[in-house]
Every structure is written in C-alpha cells, then in structure tokens.
Image: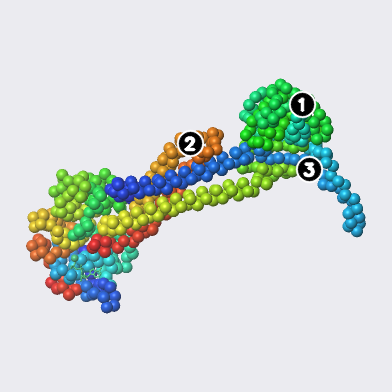
Amino acid sequence: MSTLLEVRDLVKTYGTGEAATRVLRGLSLHLDTGEMAALLGPSGSGKSTLLTILGTLMKPTSGSYIMLGQDMIAADDTALTDFRNAHIGFVFQFHNLLPDFTALENVIFPTAVREGRETPQARDRGRVLLTRMGLAERIDFPTAKLSGGQKQRVAVARALMNSPELVLADEPTGNLDRASAMQVMDLISEINREEGTTFLISTHDEKIAAVCRRQIVVGDGVVTG
Amino acid sequence: MLYGLKIATRYLTANKAQTALLVAGVAVGVFIFIFMSALIGGLAEFILSRTVGDLSHITIEAETDDPALLISPEGHVLVVAERGRTRTATLAEAATWLPLIEEVSGVRAVSPQITGAGFLTRGAQVAQVSVTGLELGRESAILDLAGYMVDGDVRVGPGLISLGRDLVDDLALSLGQTVRLESSKGVAAILTLSGIFETGNGAMDGARAFVSLSTARTLFEMPQGVSQIEIKLNDLNAADATALRIRALTGLDAVPWTDGAEQLMEALNAQAQTGYFLKTFALITIVIGVASALLLSTYRRRPEIGIMRAMGAGRGFVLFVFVTQGALIGLMGGITGAALGYLALLPFPPREAFRPGMLPLDITQGSYGLAVTLTVIGAILASILPARSAARVDPVTAIGQ
Ligand SMILES: Nc1ncnc2c1ncn2[C@@H]1O[C@H](COP(=O)(O)OP(=O)(O)O)[C@@H](O)[C@H]1O
Ligand SMILES: [Mg+2]
C-alpha cells in the first residue's frame, strides 16, 4: 500500500489571547491509498477541523502536511484550488448542493469549473455516477425536490466526479435516518472496494463507523486510537 | 468563462421576482436618463430655433470708418472730422467674396443685402420702416420669408415691395396697390405691394420692408457693393468655427451669432448642466441599487460560494459570476429602459413641429446607446464590491454556517 497523505504534529488554535481554543494539539496521521477510515470522537473533539485542514480549505497553526508527495502547507490558494479540484472530493453534512441546479448539474460541477463549460463527456460520466448511486430517475431533478438521503448520494456522486484519490466526508449521514444512512455508507464502501478511492468519514455513530475497515479516534487534540 | 455565465444566468433566473424588480429599477433609472436627454436636447433645439432660427448665423457688416483725427506732434487733438450721418458703409468687393464664402463647408446660404431706413407714404399716412434689399431668388435664404407669406409672392422684383401684415393693416393697403418709399438719403421710389408676410414678430410685421437689391441700390445711392452679407449654416453650433474660417479666407469681419448671445449660451449651458446633474443622479441610483441587491445576494449565497470554492472554483471564477450578474442586470435594465424611453417619446411630435406650450421632447436626442453603455458600465462597477466580497468568502466558515 502506498502513502496517500501524511500529517505530523498538527496544531490548530482558533482565536488569539484569552479566547484562544487549541483544538488540535500535535496530531499526526497517516493514510494509505485505498483506505476506508472512520474518524470518531465526541462532538467538539476537532473532527471537522482536521477534515478541513486535510481538505486544504484551511491551514493549520503549525505542523506539516504532505499529500501525493506535495507540500500542502507551502502551496498558495490558486495551487490548492486546482489540487482540490483534481484530487479531493468533499461530502458535507449541510449545505452540500447548489440549490438552483439540477442533480446532474451539481454532479458535473467539478469538471465543468475546470474545463470552463459542461462537456457532453462530463454529462455522460455524471449520469453514470448518478445511476450508480441509484438516482437514475432523479438525474434532471432540481436538488430542492430531492430527499435528504438522495441529496447526500448526489453529493457523493459529485465528490467522485473528477476521480479524486481522497474523499473527505464530514458526518455525511448525520442528517439521515438509519436506512438512508446505511444506503449511503454501502455505496461508499462499494466505490472504495471497486475503485480504490480513499475515504475518510467523520461520524459519532458506531454503526456507521463499523462499516469502515479502520477507525481513527480523536480526543484531546490528538489521535487516541 | 461560458460556465461562469451559465451560473450567473441561473442565479438571476432562480429568483425571477427579485431579478425582475431589480431590472425594473435599473430600467426606471435609464428611462429618466433618456427622458432627460430628450428633454434637455429638445429644449435647447427649440430655444435655439426660436431665437436663432430666423437670424443670420454669421454676419459680415461693412465697417464704418472711425472719425478722422488730426493730432499735433505734442499729442493735442487739433481737428476731429465728424462722422457723416448719411454716409453708409459698403462692402465694395462683396461680389468677389460671395462665391468664395459659398464654397466654405457648412455654409447653406449666403445673402448679400443693402439695408437702411426710410419712410413709407400712402396718401396722408406715413410710417417709418427699416428697408432690406434682397437678392432676387434669395429672399428666403436667411429668414424663411416664403414660409411666412400670407398673401402674394415672396419674390421681390424691381419696383415691388413686401410688407408685414401689421403695417399693411395700419396703412389699409392691399396687394397690387402702390406706396411711396423715401430713403434716409432722400431718394424716393413708387413701389407696388407684391407680398404680405406675417412672422409673429411685432417689429418685423410692423416696420420692415423688403425690396429688391436693385431697388435698394437706387434708394441708398449704392451703385455697387452691399451693406452686409448674411450667412446661414447647416449647423448653427458651427458658427464660431466657420466665422473664423471665413475671416481667415476673406479678411472680412465675419461675426458669428454667438457674439452678443452670451446670455443665451449661458442659459443653455446651465440647462445642460442641470441635465448632466440629473442624469448623473439617475446613474448613481442605478449603481447603488445594483450594488446593494448583489451584496445581499452574495450574503445569501455564502454557503454555496463556499461549496464552489471547495469543489475547485477559483476566486476569479466567483468574481466573474457576480460581476456577470451585474453586467446582465445592467444590460437588461438598460435595454428595457431604453425601449420604454423610446416608446414614451414616440407620441411627441418631431422637433420640426415643436410649438410653444408643449414639452419639446426630441426623440432623436434620447442618447439610447450612451444610456445603455453607461448603465452596463455602472452595473459592472457596482458589482465589483459584492463580487470581491464573494470571492473572499472563506469556504470553511461559509460551509460551517
Ligand atoms: N471557526 C472557529 N472559531 C472558533 N472556534 C472554533 C471554530 N471552529 C471550531 N471551533 C471550535 O473547535 C472545537 C472543535 O470543533 P470541530 O472541529 O467542529 O469539532 P467536531 O467536528 O469534532 O465536532 C470546538 O470546540 C469548536 O467550538
Ligand atoms: Mg464537526
């Protein structure tokens, strides 16, 4: 197994002075290509913070981060934007989809924004992905008309659009009922098995975490298990 | 950037009512802009044609010689020759200049004239008149005499005279009757009334007589030359420049109508300034409206902007999406406002038919292209601030909201 990413001694402090909160306190983590890992820990333990840093949306206060052999700390905003577009997919808990666009338009966004237009090839791949997510009937639906579970499956399809090496999912099933949550998780593990895409999924739900092969527990700002 | 255009369009169509309201607001501003342009332009046109339309645009008058002085070597004035009362100045070589002046670009008509004062006698009645000798066939070159004719013929041949309606009434004259005209030189002629005009101008209708140039030569003892040359231009705004050119060409003292019309020009200028002021306000209103609406939209769409940034949309892309929305609003509002302005101006008569008492709105002076261009530029400028704040949205806090 080859190394996908490596973070060392991550420190993240929000705010300054009296109001400063040290969320990460020297956290180190290693992920190999093809892993399917759950990120566990109580609410407020820093799961979202870690995912945000791994997703290059925020820089840590200190520490190192290498992904695919590249230094993510030194890179500038433009380089990180392109890197994210090509190598990292996101699934968030809320505010996942662009509300004024259809399911297909949402899914092909990462390709369209890179190419400057919606190509027929991108549409074809978007349809394949949506079909795979069990949404063949909902391809041209406005996202507002989709259920919570359907929305999250559209988000997963979009995260996979540019065939990224890593998909970061921050409580992707937090808003879903048990059945919908399990359906999303099953699809994710299927993709992981078949495509070798690495998934890091934060959750505080043991049943969801059980679907993953590895469990990473965060506590006191470091990995505890 | 085709994709950015798609996103911008979708954002605008997603909120149809809001967009329609915004476009309507912009259109109202553009409408005011166009209405003001047409009004200020039409008003200036109207005032100018009222005051200058019948005047000569450039006049060349014969220079009366200054009184001759005889001055002693010590500087004392020894003799002053009094200026002769009856001496009329002449443009002796007028005949040689006329073809030259006619060739100057922008000159529509040239009218050599002999002017002077005289007394008109009909039986026991006497009236003082100011006499203008016009070249046969060029009677309407400066004053639209043909247009003002109410009876008879505009052509003043030898032995004929045209008089104003008021004067004709005062003297109880009728067409074909004869009058005696005695000039200030003491020369008299018996002339037949061949035309009656009515201009609406009291001084003109009550005390003006038009005769042929040859009749005037006899009356004012001017065997050659003329006393003045009046020039009409295609564009009365070109008077200053054209007068300069004629002066350079002929050495004659060509005076544009704007000399001595400073007050009129100042008034027109002030009016134009007021127009600019109001138009600027219309544009500022548009800019503020677009900026605030887009700022609100930026704020509402923060989470989406965060998602787009996370998906690999650059700051430039976000900037483009919001600036494009501004440009589209400006374009739609501009075109709608321009179209409404045009439609609203259609029922008003063209400027040739302006009459006192109605709004002289000139549909051809709506500055439609300028209004749309300025609106689009204004809307783009207005969208820069919201677009920049959109581009600066921090994806983390936006998504976390
Ligand atoms: N932008 C922020 N500013 C200040 N404090 C923050 C910010 N984001 C998160 N925190 C704090 O950091 C801690 C960890 O938050 P988070 O990473 O969201 O944890 P989790 O996702 O595990 O619930 C919490 O105490 C939270 O209040
Ligand atoms: Mg969280």
Quarter, ligand 2: bottom left
Q: Closer to the observer: label 2 or label 3? A: 2
Residue visible at 26% across and 64% down?
Answer: B397
Mark 2, chain letter? Answer: B
Residue at disc 1, secondary structure: loop
Quadrant location, the C terminus of chain B: bottom left
Residue at disc 3, secondary structure: loop
Circle nearer the N terminus (3, 1)? 3
Q: CA distance from mark 3 to mark 1?
A: 37 Å
Q: Are marks 2 and 1 in contact (CB under 8 Å)?
A: no
On residue B63, the disc is 3
What residue is pinned by disc 2? B348
Q: Is residue A220 above or below residue B189?
A: below
Q: Closer to the observer: label 2 or label 1? A: 1
Q: Nearer the viewer, residue A86 or B201?
A: B201
Residue visible at 80% across and 27% down?
Answer: B189
Residue B308 location (% of width, % of height): 28, 56
Mark 1, chain letter? Answer: B
What residue is pinned by disc 1? B123
Residue visible at 86% across and 48% down?
Answer: B68
Disc 1 marks a residue whose amino acid type is: Gly
Mark 1 and ligand 1: say if the CB distance to the nearest ligand atom is below 8 Å: no
Q: Nearer the viewer, residue B365 or A14?
A: B365
